[in-house]
Image (cartoon, grey):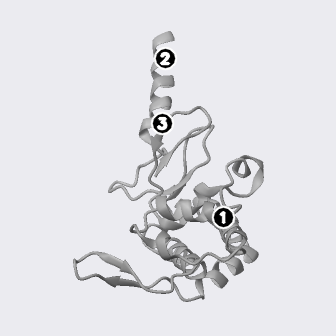
Amino acid sequence: MTLVPRDGQRFRFDAGALCLELLLTGGPGPVASRYESLDHPDGLLAWVRECRLPAGLDADLVVADDAPARFRAVRDALWRLALARAERAPYAPADLAVLNEAAAAPPLVTLLAPDGTRAWGAGATATALLATVARDAVDLFTGPHADRVRVCAADDCALLFVDTSRPGARRWCSMTRCGNRHKARAHRARATS
């Protein structure tokens, strides 16, 4: 996904998982709430167009008026769960309950189209989309990359991602942003000493 922080510098960010991409829509607390985009159905549809799901879902997705609030509740629980996973801390039971309730609903249905591409089954709803996101989180937190959920190592960045690199050594949300800024500061520090 392409992110544009307040300084206007655009950069590519790969969260590594669909569930972590949902965190880019805002979140709990004062910092993340400045970026809230799930305050109306159009914000949810905009996220659907940008996330890693194959294109076309937004065209027929049925989004009820209460969908953004349900997505915010799951997203906020996901923030806390992912942060706990990254810090190797225990999960809060209330957050687990929110995630598991969303995961229990039937997920989106995908089909193979005659041209060999993925198509979306009829009747796609925001509830099914939320179940798909929640199941992705369950798969992430219980799968082979569970111990690779990370917080960007930059002091002024709180983005969460899953490190899917082969060596498992990713430290930055993006090398073109936080990684590059860190390298530039380290270079300046070496040059002045």
Residue 130 image point, x, y percent: 58, 76
**Mark 2 falls on what kind of element?**
helix
Is residue 26 visible in the rendered image? The answer is yes
Which residue lies at the image location 66% right of the left edge and 64% below the top edge? Answer: 89
- Residue designated by label 1: 89
Q: Earlier in the sequence, mark 3 or mark 1?
A: 1
Q: Amino acid at mark 3?
A: Arg
Q: Amino acid at mark 1?
A: Ala
Which residue lies at the image location 46% right of the left edge and 52% below the top edge? Answer: 1
Q: 98 or 172, which lies in front? A: 98
Q: 115 or 14, which lies in front? A: 115
Identify the image quadrant of residue 118: bottom left
Could you tell me how far apart the alpha carbons at marks 2 and 1 are, in whole angstroms?
Answer: 36 Å
Q: 156 or 25, which lies in front? A: 25
Closer to viewer: mark 3 or mark 1: 3
Residue 49 image point, x, y percent: 48, 62
Q: Is residue 192 left or right of residue 31?
A: left
- Residue designated by label 3: 177
Label 2 close to label 3 by CB (< 8 Å)? no
Spot the residue most to the left: 115
Q: Earlier in the sequence, mark 2 or mark 3?
A: 3
User: Eyeballing the image, is 42 above or below 156?
Assistant: below
- Residue designated by label 2: 188
**Mark 3 falls on what kind of element?**
helix
Could you tell me how far apart the alpha carbons at marks 3 and 1 are, in whole angstroms?
Answer: 28 Å
Could you tell me how far apart the alpha carbons at marks 2 and 3 are, in whole angstroms?
Answer: 17 Å
Q: Earlier in the sequence, mark 2 or mark 1?
A: 1
Identify the image quadrant of residue 52: bottom left
Which residue lies at the image location 23% right of the left edge and 82% below the top edge? Answer: 114
Which residue lies at the image location 45% right of the left edge and 28% below the top edge? Answer: 183
Identify the image quadrant of residue 106: bottom right
Q: Amino acid at mark 2?
A: Arg
